[in-house]
Amino acid sequence: MADHQEASVTLPSEPASVSVARKFVAEVLAEWGLPRDCEDAETVRLIVSELATNAVQHTFGQSPTFTVGVRLDREERLRIGVTDSHPRFPKRLPAAVQQDNGRGMVIIRWLTAECGGRLTVRPTREGGKTVSIEIPWTVPVRTVPTGWPQEP
């Protein structure tokens, strides 16, 4: 593997882009040989959904687009970041049980910690921010079951 692999996509800041972001990350991970159907991949898709939802809902129309970046480095660290142009950092708000929203950052932080990773928020040079997670991620070794012909 090279030092790292990375991919990104910029999407309009609208609700329909959340599923596009989730699908983009799933396809990138599959292209890199990471299984789509493992529990870790499902967790990553949920984290991406929450990150993208926050970028759409909490920029108050001031960020026309957001960018999803995915990077896997040689040390087997997976980093996923969502960048928007709104300067306000996300806040962890107390969510009432009856509320339909307000739990995104709590969910992201908890899932990331459960994966042994960390959540960071950093300002961009352009005045926006990047909310990202970094988790350990082992690329599975492809094995051929006994009795199957080997690839040339």
Image (spheres, rainbow, N blue to C red):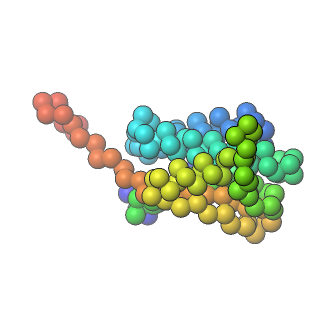
x 75%, y 39%: residue? 99
Q: In this view, does 147 lie above or below 51?
A: above
Task: State which quarter of the image contains the N terminus.
Answer: bottom left
Q: Is residue 107 left or right of residue 150?
A: right
Q: Position of residue 96 (x, y in %)?
A: 73, 44
Q: Is residue 32 left or right of residue 95?
A: left
x 58%, y 60%: residue? 119
Q: Position of residue 104 (x, y in %)?
A: 67, 47
* Residue 72 visible to the viewer: no
Q: Where is residue 24 in the image (x, y as percent from the top left)?
A: 59, 40
Residue 74, picture quadrant? bottom left
* Name of the residue lying farthest toward the right: 61
x 63%, y 41%: residue? 49
x 52%, y 45%: residue? 44
Q: In this view, does 34 lie to the left or right of 89?
A: left
Q: Position of residue 18 (x, y in %)?
A: 68, 38
In depth, the one of 44 and 96 nearer the eye is 96
In depth, the one of 21 and 28 nearer the eye is 21
Residue 144, picture quadrant? top left
* Residue 118 visible to the viewer: yes
Q: Is residue 137 left or right of residue 87?
A: left
